[in-house]
Structure formats: C-alpha cells, structure tokens
Image (cartoon, rainbow, N blue to C red):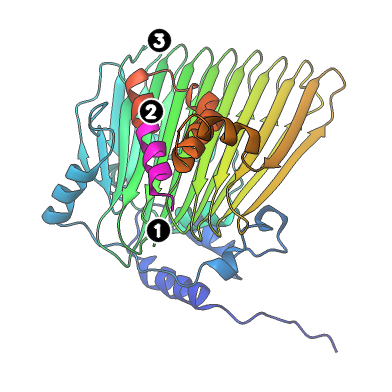
Amino acid sequence: MNSIVRPIKTAAETALVEQFTAAKASLPGDKSVRETAFGAVVEGLPHRRVEEWKYTDLRALMKDAKPLAAAPGKAEIEAAKASAPFASVRKPDALLVNGALVELGAMPKGVEAVSLAKAYADNHPLLAKFGEAGAPGDNAAIALNTAFVSDGLLLTVEAGAKIDEPLHLAFVQQGAGHAAYARVLILVEEGASLTVIESHTGKGAHQTNSYVELLAADKTDVTLFKLQNEDLATQHLATLAMKLGAEANLTTANVSRGSALARQQIFVKFEGDNTKASLNGISLSGGNRHLDTTLFVDHASFNCESREQFKQVLDGESRSVFQGKILVRQNAQKTDGRMMMRALMLSEGCEADLKPELEIYADDVQCAHGATCAAIEEDYLFYLMARGIPKKDAEAILIEAFIDDVLETVEDEALRGEIHAVTHDWLQARD
C-alpha cells in the first residue's frame, strides 16, 4: 500500500488559503485565471529544495500571511503623498497606496494611463497582454499576485512618442499588518522612448507583492529605475518581466536597501534581432536583512547583447543572494552576453550567495560570467586613514567607489543625486 506524505501547512500557507477562499468571489476579472494561479501555491510555498528558491526558503522565512489591505483612507493618502521619495526629481505621476491607485496625474502627450481596477470593470483589451513577457506563471510570487491583485496601472506609450521627463510610479505602504498586491503593464509601441521611476517606501509590518510587465516593441528605448526602501519590518516580493522587440535598447537599475525579506525577480526575453539590454543592481543589506535578486535572461534572437552588473554590500548578520542565468537558444547566433556579480562583505557574520549560470545552445556566441566576494582592501583603508580620515568615513568612500559604476548607468543627474543620497544615508546609519 502506497501512502502520500503531505507536509503540514505553515501558518502562512493556511492563512493564504483562507484569505483566497474568502476573497475570490469579490475579486475582479476572470475567476478561473485566479483559481489556476492560486493552484500553483495551494500545496505550499517554495522551499530550499526548489532550485529557484534554494537560497530564499520562502516557506520558512514567511512566518505569516497578512490580511488583504483595505482601501486607504484620506489620512493615509495624505501621509503617502508627503512621504513619496524623489520629490525634487519628479512628484508621483501615479500614486499607489496599500496596493490601490489613489491618484493619477496628467500624462504627457503620447502616453495613456488607465487604472487596473477600471480596466477590470471595463474588460479592457490590454488585460490580455499580461503574461506576454513570458515569466513563469507558476512562480510563487507571480502566482500570488495573479490570485490577489485588484488594482494597478495600464500604461501605453504610442508609436514614435519621445517622453523626455521620467514617469514616477510611487508605491507607498501606510499603516501595518496588511498585504498589498499591485500590477503594472507598460506597453511601449514602435519607435517610442520612455523612462520610468518605480519607488517602494513605507513603514509598518506589511507585505508587498508587485508585478511590473514591460512589452517594448521594435526600435524602442526604455529606462527603468527601481528603489526598494521599505521598513525593516516588511516583506517585499517583486517581479519585473520584460519582452524586447528588434533594435530596442533597455537599461535597468535597481537599488534595494529595505525590508527584512526582499526578493526581486527579473525576467528578460529577447524577441527581436539586434537588441541591447543593460541590467544593473545594488543591494545594501545590514542587520538581519535577507535581500535576493534572481535574474533570467532569455536570448532567443539574432545578434543581441546583454550586460548584467550587480553589486552587493553586506554588513551585520545579513544575507544577500544573487542568482543569474543567461539562456542562449539555438537560433540566437551572434549573442554577446556578459554577467558579473560582486559582493563586498563588511562583517564576519554576513553571508553572500552568488550563483551565475550560462546555458548555451548556439555555437557563434560570446558569453561570460563571473562572481567575486571580498572584504574592504586593508591597504586602501590604511591609505585613507593615514591622511586623517576617520575609519567609518574611509570605509564609506571605498564602498561608494565600489558601487559607483552601477549608479553611473542612471543618466539623469538629478535622479542619480537622489540615489547617492539613499546610499549615503545607509552608509551613515552603519554602526
């Protein structure tokens, strides 16, 4: 007789099942899509025996599942407006508080924006575009977002439009003890250009799950910058999925420094020839933080180039994870893909897990990857201290030099200055 062993559900898993059962009838959109998505996680959250989650055991780390956030009140909205970052660069063009789109500014000429809640109500045709970027729907973070999301933004940039000013999408959490799910679709039509700032801030023991999908057509030029700077009591699961057409240019930069547990998933698919992508990131982890960046780059077209550069700075008892994989398909000849990850370890108790991969089926390619872990070079530190610079300031100078080439990928000077201020604050807060 064969027996089936079923693990006992954790408190978080039990709560998720109860929440979905109670909420699914009131959630908008196609109920069958939500049911299918939730089916991917109903048997349990991913754990260390699942390869993609080997270093971030979500089943163990996610102690509970917060209830779905209620609609924010006036006081919460006003507080969110006051606390949104980058005000000197760009006030929020779209403000999402606790997962709900509460304010949508006037869009530049050539840009159309619709709230996801309204899109559900109107059965908007763009809803069918979700999933086209090719990110795996059974991924736990994506599946949970699909199951529970009810608001967000649909953004369309018309063909040939050149949007000079960046668009700022501000995700702010107010209050405590809730889970917020939001989803954004960015459709950039042929020949258009766009810069998007995505910021995540907030206080309290909340849980964030965001999903941003970019569909960039031929000859587009897109820059995406993200800041994750939520409170230490938070959990942050985020997905960025992108599909690129022919002769497109993409630049992304991600700075992660908040949350007790944060995982940023990035999926990129080259679906057109002669396209270039530059993917960059910085994680600043201290205390007991666990910051994870997981990247998958799918080269499926001819003569495409990708550059991946990610740097981690670790202090205290923190743990930082980077998993990066480049897949080169058989028809993706002339691919040029290079990935580098570096970790700077500032304490004895921190841990860096770096896992670069190449999977190549074409024979005319140039691909490489590398990973390094090191402490601050003592000779450099001594050189600065010998000139009267205090040790903490000398370390800050060397750390800023370590991450500076990633920050330089942000071309907007005002935005780059704001990011420098974020990293400087982290350095000053070190013990």
The image shows residue 424 at horizontal and vertical percentages of 39, 37
The residue nearer to you, when weighing 189 against 339, is 339
Name the amino acid type tagged 3: Gly
Q: Quadrant of residue 267?
A: top right
- Quadrant assignment for the N terminus: bottom right
**Crowding at label 3, few (<14), some or many (≥20) Cα neighbours within 10 Å?**
some
Indicate whether 56 appears above or below 364.
Answer: below
Q: Which circle, 1 or 3, is nearer the viewer?
A: 1
Question: What's the CA distance linking mark 2 and mark 3?
Answer: 17 Å
Q: Which residue is mark 3?
A: 160
**Crowding at label 2, few (<14), some or many (≥20) Cα neighbours within 10 Å?**
some
Residue 196's tag is 2
Most extreme residue toward the bottom is: 1
The residue nearer to you, when weighing 312 against 275, is 312
Q: Which residue is mark 1?
A: 232
The image shows residue 416 at horizontal and vertical percentages of 39, 25
- Mark sitting earlier along the chain (1/2): 2
Picture residue at 43% right of the left edge, 55% below the top: 259
The image shows residue 17 at horizontal and vertical percentages of 48, 73
- Mark sitting earlier along the chain (1/3): 3
Name the amino acid type tagged 1: Leu
Total marks in image: 3
- Mark sitting earlier along the chain (2/3): 3
Kindly check if marks 2 and 3 are in contact, taking CB atoms under 8 A apart as contact. Answer: no
Picture residue at 44% right of the left edge, 19% below the top: 189
The residue nearer to you, when weighing 342 against 244, is 342
Picture residue at 63% right of the left edge, 41% below the top: 343
Magenta-highlighted residues: 420-431
> Element type at marker 1?
loop
The residue nearer to you, when weighing 124 against 106, is 106
